[in-house]
Image (cartoon, rainbow, N blue to C red):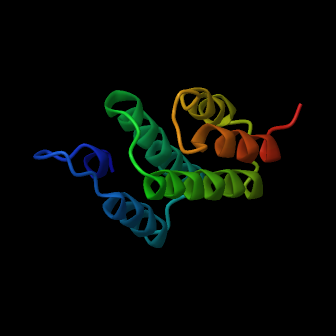
Amino acid sequence: MFEAFYPKRGYNHKLKDGKQAISDFKKHGASPDLLADLMLFYVETGVKLTNEFGDIDEGFYSSLETTYMAALKLMKKENLLAKFADRAGKVVNDTIDIGWGFYDTLCDIHSDFYTN
């Protein structure tokens, strides 16, 4: 998964490879909490990449948003929201300076699942 964002050579991230890793993991019967963990790691790694190298493009952020939403839906379905609350919130906080409306979208998604 990490190499999808940080390839051994070059600078071209390959979101497709990261999404494929999630799909393959799911097909192999991963437990819901491990699958949610991997999905969240995908988003965390994408956010880290952006914070290190600057804004990327809308498609990149859309992929992360979609995966974040899917991860939180899975967490809710499997009663795992509390287990991942800190990490799910940190992802949002770590996007505050990222463009393309990414922060706003993740805030909206987060607030749909974690309300006070």
Q: Residue at x 49, y 66 (%)?
A: 26
Residue 80 shows up from this direction: no
Q: Is residue 103 above or below residue 3?
A: above
Q: Nearer the viewer, residue 38 or 62?
A: 62
Q: Is residue 23 above or below residue 32?
A: below
Q: Could you say where residue 63 lies in the image, as x and y percent from the top left?
A: 49, 58
Q: Is residue 52 above or below residue 47?
A: above
Residue 61 shows up from this direction: yes
**Can you name the residue that lies furthest to the left here?**
9
Q: Could you say where residue 30 lies in the image, as x and y percent from the top left?
A: 49, 61
Side of 9 where 54 appears, left or right: right
Residue 21 appears in which quarter of the rendering?
bottom left
Q: Residue at x 71, y 39 (%)?
A: 107
Q: Nearer the viewer, residue 98 or 68?
A: 98
**Can you name the residue that lies furthest to the bottom here?**
27
Q: Could you say where residue 116 lies in the image, as x and y percent from the top left?
A: 89, 30
Residue 60 appears in which quarter of the rendering?
bottom left
Side of 66 where 12 appears, left or right: left
Q: Nearer the viewer, residue 55 or 26?
A: 55
Q: Residue at x 75, y 58 (%)?
A: 77
Q: Is residue 65 above or below residue 84?
A: below
Tally the numbered discs.
0
Side of 22 where 37 appears, left or right: right
Q: Nearer the viewer, residue 21 or 107?
A: 107
Q: Residue at x 42, y 51 (%)?
A: 57
Q: Could you say where residue 93 lies in the image, as x and y percent from the top left?
A: 61, 27
